[in-house]
Amino acid sequence: MKYLEWEVNVPEAIRQDSVWRVEAYRLALFLADIAWHDASKLMKVPFSQRVAGQLYDSVGSVGANISEGYSRGTGRDRARFYEYALGSARECRHWYHQSRHALGDEILQHRLGILTQIIRLLLRMVPDQRQTILREEIVMYTTSNIPDAPLPIIEGEETNSTNTHVSRFTFPERSDLAQIESTIESGVVSRRGETVLVSGEGCWMVDSEGNRYLDLTSSQGVAMLGYGHPALSAAIAEQAQRLHACPGFFNNDSRARFLEALIGVMPGHLRHAFIANSGAEAIDGCIKFARLTTERTGIVAAKGSFHGRTIGAVSLTWNPKYRKPFEPLLPGVSHVKYNDLAELDAAISDETAAVVLEIVQGEGGVNLGEAEFLQGAQALCRERGALLVIDEIQTGFGRTGKWFGFQHFGLEPDLIALAKGVGAGFPMGAIVYTDRVQEALFVGAHGSTFGGNPLASAAGLAAIRAYQDENLIERAEAAGQRLRARLEETLADCRVVREIRGPGLMIGIDLRTKVGPYLKSLMEEYRVLTLPAGTTVLRLLPPLIISDEEIEIGVAAIAAALGG
Ligand SMILES: Cc1ncc(COP(=O)(O)O)c(C=O)c1O
């Protein structure tokens, strides 16, 4: 841990003055110290530079006027400077309010607490007859009362209150942690720089240096409820304290409730589920279940697809970079051109157990499935006795503006693979399927030590309830339309943009050039997190709770980064 410490020494002359003057001076200096820290943080957040400058100016002016008041002897002259200080404190509240998104609510409350105290103390220092007028004026401007609340301290520490104030802020060491990861971890996932993310709140993630990032990725499409969602966090914490493990061969209350909720959001023909731990595992389960049900082994998948990286799932994944080094893979797998019904027709034989498709190819480039192709795939499967497996791992749980992507096309898949949004970020996956598939299964056909674990079940249940209680599926549709419309407007003349596409909050900005450098500059210069899809698509998968204001911040940053 790294400590940032500073001391405020109150000069002797001031120390002999009345208690509340000393207190106001001390607080103003303390505020100046933290405001310096806040302003330097704001400088790194897109569009906050102006606020940073104004904030720092107004804080400085509070301190300067208090100090000037001290040196002005007595009487009216002195009071005038306290009034100036009051005006600056009022302004300072305004600038702190403006920086709410970049600094976060906790910091905002803390700083407003200090400012309220300063305002309260300064009011006492002006002549009685001015106090009433100023109080009213301040209340009008700040639209809040001036409570006598005690000063909140977050991570600070007060010592020797007569003349010294020591503040202490803690940060984990960034370089150490990044180095540990790069030395020990496998390195199969390419890392974006040295940043160490340590916490999150709503749609924002925070690194070890206190920088805040607007997360337009939901951590690879999983944190649908953002970070620190109260109901999700409480459910996981409660379950962790009560029962964190329970084998699948015993019944468990949380698992039962989760299963009931999961089937409750499915169309009526999908009545059974197996709980897994990840997307790839759900896909592997679908392959096994389809083989058992049809007593066939062939699988048809699509070019451009991504289904995961276990040996089964990677056999279906299209990108040769992921597949080739691990051959020989699962036999009997073929890939057809996405949205080419004729190719699919030619590929499905009486050996085909399943056709496995995404509704929108996420990793492949945010490629939209067409109605004719998807509905045609279902008809061909029905005709030839193959099962239709829809991979809803990325598109499920509201991502596309409906509970599941297949609902846009009125499909009735035989099996669906789920992960990501099912636990809103808690690692879990699931397969949901029909009676016909259920009939083919037997004890021992499949299993998982961790699948249906109580912690995951509690998280899954809390996530589904939050999607329902907060109307997040409808909200994702509305927020997605807004995000797309704002991007289309803002990037209309941007030469680098070829096309903007995608349903709900799954949006791809197809570029005429490689996406890599833009991901980097969005993160490093604008503190906005985005994803690639293929080599040229900038992919946005924000949490379903994203606000209109956050959409504006994201759009403005993307436009600035792309030169729109
Ligand atoms: C459509 C799709 N299927 C499968 C997977 C694999 O999921 P996991 O990484 O949880 O194994 C992903 C992951 O990104 C995905 O987007």
Image (cartoon, helix red, strand yellow):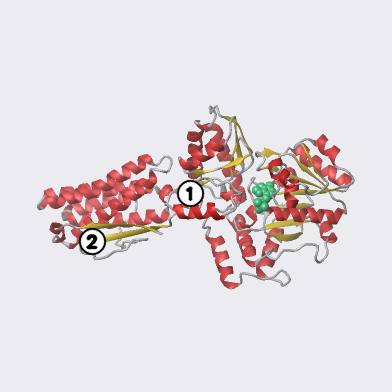
In three-dimensional space, the C-alpha distance between marks 2 and 1, rounded to whole angstroms, equals: 35 Å
Residue under numbered circle 1? 195
Residue at the image point whose x is 33% and y is 59% from the top = 168
- Where, by quadrant of the figure, is residue 276 drawn? bottom right
- Label 1 crowd (10 A; few <14 / some 14-19 / many >=20): some
Q: Is the Cβ of the residue at disc 2 closer than 8 Å to that at disc 1?
A: no
Which residue does the image show at 56% across and 60% down from the upper left? 232
Q: Identify the residue at image location x=61%, y=59%.
A: 465
Q: Secondary structure at mark 1?
A: loop
Left or right of 388 in this view: 395: left
67 versus 456 height, above or below: above
Q: Nearer the viewer, residue 3 or 352?
A: 3
Q: In x, y percent, where is residue 46?
A: 43, 40
| Amino acid marked by disc 2 | Thr
Q: Which residue is mark 2?
A: 164
Q: Secondary structure at mark 2?
A: strand
- Quick one: quadrant of the N terminus? bottom left
Quick check: 507 left or right of 336? left
Q: Quadrant of residue 22?
A: bottom left
**Side of 260 where 42 appears, left or right:** left
Res 227 visible: yes
| Position of residue 520 measured from the top left corner of the image (x, y, whole percent) | 51, 40
Q: Position of residue 134 (x, y in %)?
A: 23, 51
- Above-or-below relation of 264 to 524: below
